[in-house]
Image (cartoon, rainbow, N blue to C red):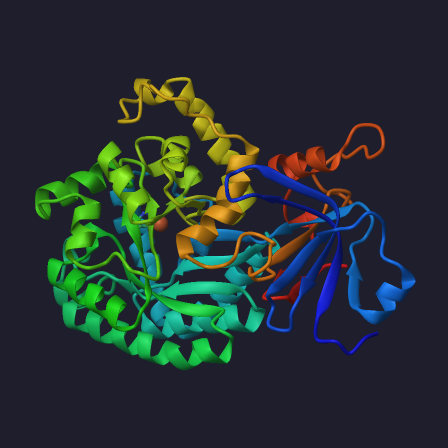
Amino acid sequence: MSDSPKRVFVGPLVQCSIDRHLEVVENAAIEVDKDGFVISVTALDSLPSTEYLKSNNVTILPTGSFLVPGLIDLHYHAPQLPQAGTNLHIPLHDWLTTTTLPLEAKYANTQFAETVFEKVVKRTLGHGTTTAVYFATKHRDSAKILASCCIKAGQRALVGKVCMDNKEMCLCTKESLCTCTETTTESIHETRTFLEEMVSLTKSCNSRVEPVVTPRFVPSCSPHLLTQLGSLSQEFNAHVQSHAWESDWQVEYGEQNRNGRDLDLFQNHNLISKQGTVFAHSVHANDSEIKQLAHHQIGVAHCPLSNAFFANGIMPARLMLEAGVPVGLGTDVGGAWSSSILDSCRQAVTSSRILRDGVGKLRGARNGPCSHPAEINHVDAFWMATVGGGLALKKKIGRIAPGYKFDALVVDVHAPNSNIDSFDSLVDTIETKFQKFVYLGDDRNIRQVYVDGICVLDKQ
Ligand code: GUN
Ligand code: FE
């Protein structure tokens, strides 16, 4: 074994180009430096010589497997894992007030927070999520515990202490006894302290885990809170995340009670961050708002599974992509039942087909009848799960190319007892194996997970 700090991975590589094409290198040699950056990607004519293997720190992928970039989940509510797969039959507002906010209130208990968050990170990493953008809860300590779990497990993450000072958004009858929301002063103070405390944590993990300023959504936040959060995001150079244009009810609440629509309100409060802002959902953004999202390169977390339950419409993913909006995917657990971004890929394709065929019109959603080609395919979906997520976060992740971080998955479509049937020599090419991974794959097909060049999960 060489003592060179540089490592080389040799095997097939499948990924999306920036312009949404599939790129396949049947036999790639990927050089990675000691800081986890990809130095070069070379197409080899044949397997490397024994000399080469001796002189380099080389890992050859097991036969039949291939490398893809790690998956990016732009929207995950970590405290909601305990309710994933339940209560999805109720409307968004009722779901929040009767189920979700009372569950999140329980994270005042730091032991409970630790138990759940360890599970969350284990589950998402197992599903190949190398970068996750998390909502924690309103509690600073719980948000710090989530950040520590990500650091310990080696996951790249943005972690938000959730801000919400509007008591109209919960069912607690006595303001003084409300455990769901927080006061405006508390929210601002706790956010500032969280951002300060995260500075040293960020340094200790090569910036793999960072804080993100997190106003829950317009209905949860007073205008004064939004203004202060805008200032804090600028002062700390932090990303911003929130929910935008998610459902009819949410959009109407902003128009009637805040005299504006999501993008205008976030812009007015200086919440469009240079580091990157991510709006979850964006189902009901209108054409001029879509243009603005593209112009300002504001990220959208497309959460097709939870949209099917809560959004009263289908997000026009292809329209957004063609407009140049940096769209990535989110699972939105527990507004959806799956922690797997591959499930989000599949639902993104399915929803786009339903939109194309006009069901949006029958439902009365703004995006029907569909006057433009609406469908996306598995390559577009995987692009969102990788390249789009990286663009939304303005980070060099989502591709395996020089200058990008080596965040990658070793995929094995032959894994025993998995959901994929592969017939190597007779039927399957590397492209069809990749398609099968997108449509049929799950955690059983992910053998190894690399973040920042480090193997953080090895199922060999
Ligand atoms: N809007 C405000 N909070 C939430 C949440 O937790 N989940 C979803 N899907 N929408 C929200
Ligand atoms: Fe959400």
Q: Is there any visible trace of residue 216 in the rendered image?
A: yes
With 155 as the anchor, is 140 left or right in this view?
Answer: left
Tell me where residue 427 appears, x and y as whole percent. Answer: 79, 28
Tell me where residue 225 appears, x and y as whole percent. Answer: 16, 63
**Which image quarter holds the N terminus?**
bottom right
Tell me where residue 311 appears, x and y as whole percent. Answer: 32, 36
Tell me where residue 175 appears, x and y as whole percent. Answer: 13, 63
Quadrant housing residue 123: bottom right
Q: Nearer the viewer, residue 195 or 405?
A: 405
**Which image quarter holds the C terminus?**
bottom right
Q: Is there any visible trace of residue 170 in the rendered image?
A: no
Eyeballing the image, is 302 above or below 148?
A: above
Q: Nearer the viewer, residue 389 or 37?
A: 37
Residue depicted at x 78% and y 78%: 3
Residue depicted at x 51% and y 36%: 380
Eyeballing the image, is 37 above or below 87?
A: below
Number of numbered markers: 0
Q: Furthest-right residue in view? A: 50
Quadrant housing residue 428: top right
Quadrant housing residue 430: top right
Q: Nearer the viewer, residue 403 or 264?
A: 403
